[in-house]
Amino acid sequence: FSNADKNRLRALTDTKAIVDGNTSGVELKRAIYKYGAALTVDRVFVAWARRDAFDEDEAALWRAQINEAVHWIPRQLPVTGDDVLALGVSPGLEVGECLAEVENLWIAGGFEMSRDELLNELRRIGDPK
């Protein structure tokens, strides 16, 4: 096995559910963004297979998640470390921390925040007060 194959199989057998029958659209997109479409589809199938019984309506929900995972293309975070540095944050760990915080906001908002909105959040986060 390649390292990528090993990592995918390990993640596939991880018992922590990243999706289930009630996963919202934002949560599903978060999983695709974090784990990639292929692994997310695999995990949807695993979660679906673990269900003891389901009706056609529930099956439609699972199929919709698979369809979304296959067709949704994650966007790239519209801000970068250079943007953080341009706001006067010193190079180092704080740059990554600021980016991680704004990325979490962007993901929680369904990947809809604009670059300008994210820059405003970076200004707020990076403001030493």
Image: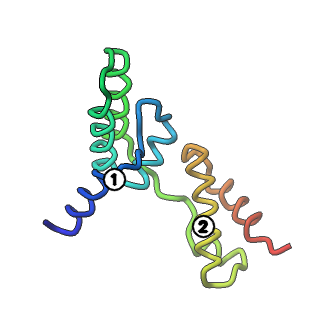
Quadrant including the N terminus:
bottom left
**Residue depicted at 56% across the width and 43% down the height:** 110
Identified by mark 1, the residue type is: Asp
Q: Mark 2 or mark 1, which has the lower sequence index?
A: 1
Please name the residue shown 61% across and 84% down the image. 92
Which residue is located at x 28 percent, y 48 percent?
38
Element type at mark 1: loop
Residue 94's x, y, as percent? 65, 77
User: At which x and y percent is residue 82?
Assistant: 59, 75
Q: Which residue is mark 2?
A: 99
Tell me if label 2 and label 1 are in contact, CB under 8 Å. Answer: no
Percent x, y of residue 66: 32, 35
Q: Residue furthest bottom?
A: 91
Q: Residues within 10 Å of mark 1 (few under 14, many from 20)?
A: few
> Toward the viewer: 38 or 76?
38
Q: Nearer the viewer, residue 2 or 15?
A: 15
Residue 74 versus residue 4 in the image, above or below: above
Q: Position of residue 23 (x, y in %)?
A: 47, 35
Q: Nearer the viewer, residue 78 or 42?
A: 42
- Look at the picture and state if 93 lies above or below 50: below
Q: Amino acid at mark 2?
A: Leu
- Cα separation, mark 2 vs mark 1, equals 28 Å
Judging by the rendered image, the residue that carries numbered circle 1 is: 14
Question: Which residue is the extreme one toward the left?
Answer: 1
- Given the current orientation, which residue lies at the most extreme front position? 52
Q: Is residue 39 left or right of residue 30?
A: left
Displayed quadrant of residue 61: top left
Q: In the figure, residue 5 lies in which quadrant?
A: bottom left
Q: Please state if 61 lies on the left or on the right of 85 as rendered.
A: left
| SS category of the residue bearing label 2 | helix
- Which quadrant holds the C terminus? bottom right
